[in-house]
Image: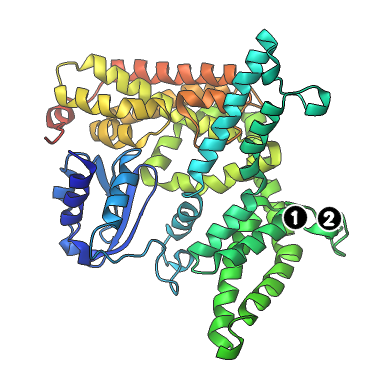
């Protein structure tokens, strides 16, 4: 089935073009908000070939499609004649004001979703540079010399470093821009807010005058930038609503920059810095003191977070750890979850070779799983079978247990996991040992525990 016909069937079962209010996608999911939940045929939708699972609430279904497919289907739907939708929600009802527990997580998702491919691409470039450095250490080929140019390093490697590091240097600005946009504000005012967090200019090192604090470039990181982006959008909209028409060209921007700029310098940055320091210190204490047991628990619990979408709430924490330490240990432990599931899927593949539907589902989801994208195997294989989902989680715990023996290991970026996570880890050997252990744990447990025969008998893949 082509993605175009897939998108057409999805649209039909969602109730048609007139029933779509909001439309967006992440790497593996199509998220929609519908006007009338009674027009959505969730049962028929879940049976469409190419749809792995339908989750979410009645009015806000999430359709699991898998990597690449979700983006293509969303693009097809956006081009449908007569389809009127919003990607961000009404300007007067931003995500953050939703009276439900998932509001903050949805906000995180909308802020970081457009940034995740950039995290992945530039982070992977760091991994490629590590391979080039290894080649230089073995062969001495000058073009791969990673030293500074003044110390004899190559201009080629210096150029790659510029390409790989620029996004991380301006990450606070990107987060603030997207935060303001999600809140229905002017994204260029978000740029100003993020810029203030990134660089306080001539104030750097100057005492604030209270609590012994000083102005510091980048203090508070992405948390402060996100808060500043949200606040500047709120203030801008409030000023626009209350100021005379004759002043609406200049005054909203002027007032927003002055008010939010001062709040950012004197409140958001120091408070965000304290929160960031506390989170980072707590996690690092856990990794250094709880060690293997802490790593085992963290890795084993990650698949349920992915299943429910709660893993989006960890993205700001990863970003804060990267900014503070240069890597996120948390992401490395989370990556073990995908390995445990790969092991479980392999065990199912060889144990139940006679089940052609199961074989087909595993073949479709396994490549993505090996590359660190878990939803196809979660919703297409292990979760429908019940016990294999649990054995995959426990298998992931074995990977976290191994990683816990190597303090200081972690990912220098996010969204590069699976086997590719080796390239972006501070300790590639520790990562690959953990990854292999998680696969082995998931495989062995699933092989001996297996799946419920009733669940296997009802396992189908629609033609």
The residue labelled by disc 2 is: 204
**Label 2 SS:** loop
- The image position of residue 277, as x and y in percent, is 71, 47
At 47% across and 50% down in the image, what residue appears? 114
Q: Residues within 10 Å of mark 1 (few under 14, many from 20)?
A: some
- On residue 199, which mark appears? 1
Q: Quadrant of the N terminus?
A: top left
Viewer-closest of 358 and 389: 358
Instruction: Please tell me which residue lies in front, 375 or 434.
Output: 375
Does the rendering let one see residue 414?
no
Q: Is residue 60 above or below residue 320?
A: below
User: What's the distance in space between the residues labelled 1 and 2, CA to CA?
Assistant: 8 Å
Residue depicted at x 45% and y 68%: 94
- Mark 1–mark 2 contact, CB under 8 Å? yes
Is 133 positioned to the left or the right of 390 in the image?
Answer: right
Residue 68 at x, y = what percent? 34, 39
Q: Residue 116, which numbered label?
A: none
In the figure, 134 relative to 63: above or below?
above
Residue 440 placement (x, y as % from top left): 41, 15
Residue 341, position as x, y percentages in the image: 37, 26
């Amino acid at each position: 089935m082509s993605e175009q016909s897939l998108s057409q069937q999805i649209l039909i079962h969602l109730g048609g073009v007139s029933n779509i209010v909001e439309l967006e996608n992440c790497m593996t999911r199509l998220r929609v908000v519908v006007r009338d939940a009674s027009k959505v045929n969730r049962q028929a939708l879940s049976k469409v070939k190419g749809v792995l699972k339908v989750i979410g609430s009645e009015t806000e279904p999430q359709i699991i499609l898998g990597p690449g497919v979700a983006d293509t289907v969303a693009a097809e739907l956006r081009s449908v004649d007569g389809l009127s939708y919003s990607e961000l929600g009404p300007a007067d009802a931003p995500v953050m004001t939703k009276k439900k527990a998932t509001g903050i997580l949805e906000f995180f998702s909308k802020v970081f979703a457009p940034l995740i491919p950039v995290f992945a691409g530039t982070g992977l470039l760091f991994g490629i540079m590590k391979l080039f450095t290894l080649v230089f250490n073995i062969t001495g080929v000058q073009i791969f010399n990673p030293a500074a140019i003044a110390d004899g390093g190559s201009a080629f490697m210096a150029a790659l470093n510029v390409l790989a590091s620029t996004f991380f240097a301006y990450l606070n600005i990107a987060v603030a821009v997207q935060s303001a946009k999600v809140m229905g504000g002017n994204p260029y005012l978000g740029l100003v807010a993020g810029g203030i967090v990134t660089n306080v200019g001539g104030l750097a090192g100057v005492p604030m005058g209270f609590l012994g604090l000083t102005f510091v470039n980048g203090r508070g990181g992405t948390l402060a930038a996100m808060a500043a982006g949200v606040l500047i959008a709120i203030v801008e909209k409030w000023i626009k609503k209350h100021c005379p028409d004759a002043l609406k060209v200049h005054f909203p921007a002027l007032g927003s920059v002055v008010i939010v700029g001062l709040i950012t310098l004197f409140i958001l940055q120091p408070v965000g810095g304290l929160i960031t320091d506390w989170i980072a210190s707590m996690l690092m204490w856990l990794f250094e003191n709880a060690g293997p047991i802490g790593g085992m628990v963290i890795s084993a619990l990650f698949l349920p977070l992915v299943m429910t979408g709660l893993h989006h709430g960890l993205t700001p924490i990863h970003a804060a750890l990267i900014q503070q330490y240069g890597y996120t240990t948390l992401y490395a432990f989370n990556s073990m979850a995908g390995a445990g599931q790969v092991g479980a899927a392999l065990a199912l593949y060889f144990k139940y070779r006679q089940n052609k539907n199961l074989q087909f589902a595993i073949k479709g989801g396994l490549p993505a799983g090996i590359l660190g994208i878990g939803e196809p195997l979660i919703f297409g294989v292990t979760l429908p079978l019940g016990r294999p989902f649990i054995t995959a989680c426990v298998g992931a715990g074995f990977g976290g247990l191994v990683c816990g023996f190597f303090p200081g290991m972690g990912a220098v970026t996010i969204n590069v996991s699976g086997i590719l996570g080796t390239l972006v880890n501070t300790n590639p050997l520790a990562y690959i040992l953990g990854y292999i252990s998680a696969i082995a744990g998931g495989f062995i447990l699933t092989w001996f525990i297996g799946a419920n025969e009733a669940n296997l008998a009802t396992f189908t893949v629609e033609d």
